[in-house]
Image (spheres, rainbow, N blue to C red):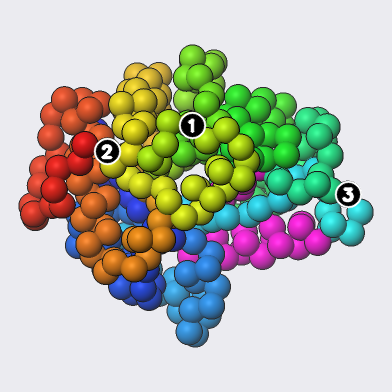
Amino acid sequence: MNISDFGMDTITLAGSLEAKLEAIRDAGFSQVMLSARDVAGYPGGVEAAAEVIAASRLRVTGFQVLRDFEGLAGPLHDYKIGVAKAMLEMCRTLGAPLLLVCSSTSKHATDDVDALARDLAKLATLAVPMGLRIAYEALSWGRTVNEYTASWEIVRRADCANLGVGLDTFHLYAAGTALEPLDDVDPSKIFLVQLADFMWNVLPSHEERIETARHFRVFPGEGVHGPDIADLVRRIDAAGYRGDYSFEVFNDDYQQMPPDAVARRARASAAHLSQQVTRRSLPMSAPLVPALR
């Protein structure tokens, strides 16, 4: 593994878009995952945000996140199609090659997996003329799809070249899903891997998962699932995954810290994870935070 394999999500950092991009770049990363809230209200609009991002020289990993899209009917379905089209347009403007879609939590959504697959296929079809890919991620509190095994089944049924799965290590270990079924997932259909850990061994209820996910994720190496996350990365790397890894760490404490300090923690986590996976260090050019556990 190499530092170029890793990037950061802007949602992990506090501050302006410019400050976030500068901190990510100065920490040694070469890619960035963009959060909609960092660009939708940017002064001058999305086009101005795109210019700032291009000037940062960071490669855009993708754009997030479309929520509660699949499984709806009637006016709700039409409404979400409109939202999806707007987000796809933002993707294209920002130079993002991929839109992340989280599995639905809506009580109005059907649990018919064929219907879910049809909706994801429709979204993928909308993305084709724009040259975009769709990564479908299982939220650990999703209504029907709450494990990567289920999101892979939806992607498999939809059978679209530009539709794949997004893996999120927080949700995987929050749900307690075994790694063995990953062997059945086509590595070319894994479009993105998002990295985060947490401080507790188990999160048995949806409420606990939501609270931890939104307020107290930590970087791999800071939590209790570091060896398991390294095992996951090792497994999919051996299977042939050559895509991106992005740190997506929602943490209230980090939102009160300077973005450069948090970005350095991410760089330390990348080094720690690389050592765990390949037993060799990433080249380091700047002092890092104290060694992670």
- The relative height of residue 21 versus residue 172 in the rendered view (above or below) is below
Q: Earlier in the sequence, mark 3 or mark 1?
A: 3
Quadrant (top left/top right/bottom left/bottom right) for the N terminus: top left
* Alpha carbon distance from label 2 to label 3: 43 Å
Q: On the image, numbered disc 1 is attached to which residue?
A: 202
Q: On the image, numbered disc 3 is attached to which residue?
A: 73
Q: Is residue 143 magenta?
A: no
Q: What element carries label 2?
A: loop
* Residue at 47% across, 69% down: 38
Residue 104, quarter of the rendered image:
top right
Residues drawn in magenta: 79-103
Looking at the rendered image, the disc whose residue lies closer to the viewer, 2 or 3, is: 2
Dot 3 crowding, Cα within 10 Å, few <14, some 14–19, many 20+ = some
Q: What residue type is labelled 3?
A: Ala
Q: How many labels does the image show?
A: 3
* Alpha carbon distance from label 3 to label 1: 35 Å
Q: 216 or 229: which is nearer to us? A: 216
Residue 77 coordinates in the image, percent (x, y): 83, 54
Residue 221 numbered tag: 2
Q: Which of marks 2 and 3 is nearer the N terminus?
A: 3
Q: 104 or 116: which is nearer to us? A: 104
Residue 137 coordinates in the image, percent (x, y): 58, 40
Q: 157 or 183: which is nearer to us? A: 183
* Residue at 41% across, 61% down: 252
Q: 224 or 85: which is nearer to us? A: 224
* Alpha carbon distance from label 2 to label 1: 17 Å
Dot 2 crowding, Cα within 10 Å, few <14, some 14–19, many 20+ = many
Report if the CB atoms under discs 3 and 1 are less than 8 Å apart: no
